[in-house]
Image: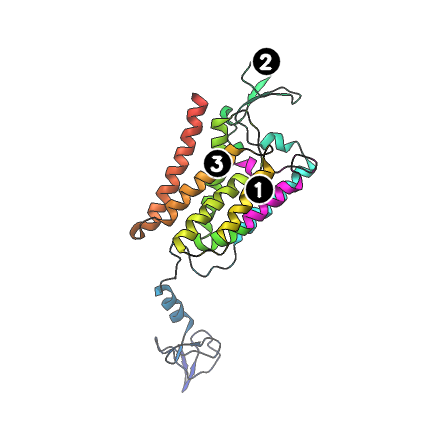
Amino acid sequence: METVGAETTCYRHPRRETYVRCSRCDRFICSDCMRAAPVGQRCPECVKGENRTIRQARTIFGAPAGVTTAYVTYSIIAINLLVYLVELLRPAIIERFDTLGTALVDSAGHYYIDDGAYPGYHQIGVLHGEVWRLLTGAFLHELPGGGFGLTHIAFNLMWIFTLGVFLERELGWARFLAVYLLAALGSSVLEVVLDPHQRSIGASGAGFGLAAAYFVVTRKLHHYPIDRNRLMLSFVLWLVLAAGFTSWQGHLGGLLTGAVVALGIAYAPKKHQTQAQLIVLAVVTLVLIAAIAAKATG
């Protein structure tokens, strides 16, 4: 506060005369610094201090309540679309980054999907150190003219949007991202373990993980923003349409992983909720890593 004779000035704006004091700290404040309070006016510093003492409302899963924009969901959709544009320009990236356990390839790019030994060929795949394929394959989709074409990415992104917006608002962006990435990882791991010679691409494994998480979360909330029967019918229809073109191992892996992670998040004890949720995420991650390591060394 600065006093000039009988005049008083704002503690933040010394050139502004004022006769209003903060009702908490008693400092003089001008009209620009006044913040309405139940009694009198408050200065910005007192308002900030009070806000820090107010406990932020949270969902029952531990996420900040009232979040309306699903930034992670939109980002995942945008990344998939961007990758798809890159695929259209350079289709060869599909063979470089798809989900594949093991294969042989020569310098000209000719593949042998078996365990034989062929002169001039070298081994590729997750089981030979290309571990990035466990996640990168979940961001690739069928190009036009392929088995599913544009339908592949359209269906997957539709489900990511439909389920993701709701789940991200309830779980929070970090928990939602963990569910999505672990479901994608679980999808690839089960596929590599059960059929390491199979090549696959697509976000459907992660999508099935989100579907499992949706059923767990809505059961916990007793609130169903999307009719469960309609959702189940849509997924059955998706499976029928995709028969012969998709990996059931990947779908099952994503479904099971999403369910386990969502159960751990939804039913973690309230007293140590965040710690328990982190432990669940760490255990699931370690189990998936151990499964790949066992397959690679077995």
Boundaries of the magenta span: 135-161
Tell me how far mark 3 sits from mark 1, CA to CA: 14 Å
Q: Which residue is mark 3?
A: 252
**Residue indicated by mark 2:** 118
Query: Viewed as shown, does residue 76 lie left or right of 296?
Result: right
Answer with mark 2 or mark 1, whichever residue precedes in sequence. 2
Determine contact: label 3, label 1, CB under 8 Å: no
The residue beneath circle 1 is 238
Q: Residues within 10 Å of mark 3 (few under 14, many from 20)?
A: many
Asked if 150 appears above or below 172 in the picture, the reply is above
Q: CA distance from mark 2 to mark 3?
A: 33 Å
Nearest the viewer among 30 and 107 is 107
Q: Which quadrant would residue 257 be assigned to in this image?
A: top left
Above or below, 44 relative to 175? below
State the separation of the CA atoms marked 2 and 1: 39 Å
Q: Amino acid at mark 1?
A: Trp
The residue type indicated by label 2 comes to: Tyr
Give the foreground label among 3 and 1. 1
Residue closer to the observer: 11 or 83: 83
Instruction: Measuring from the top left, give residue 127's x and y in whole percent.
Output: 49, 25
Query: Which of the two labelled residues, at mark 2 and mark 3, occupies the earlier sequence position?
Result: 2
- The answer to whether residue 165 is left or right of residue 58 is right
Q: Residue at x 38, y 49 (%)?
A: 266
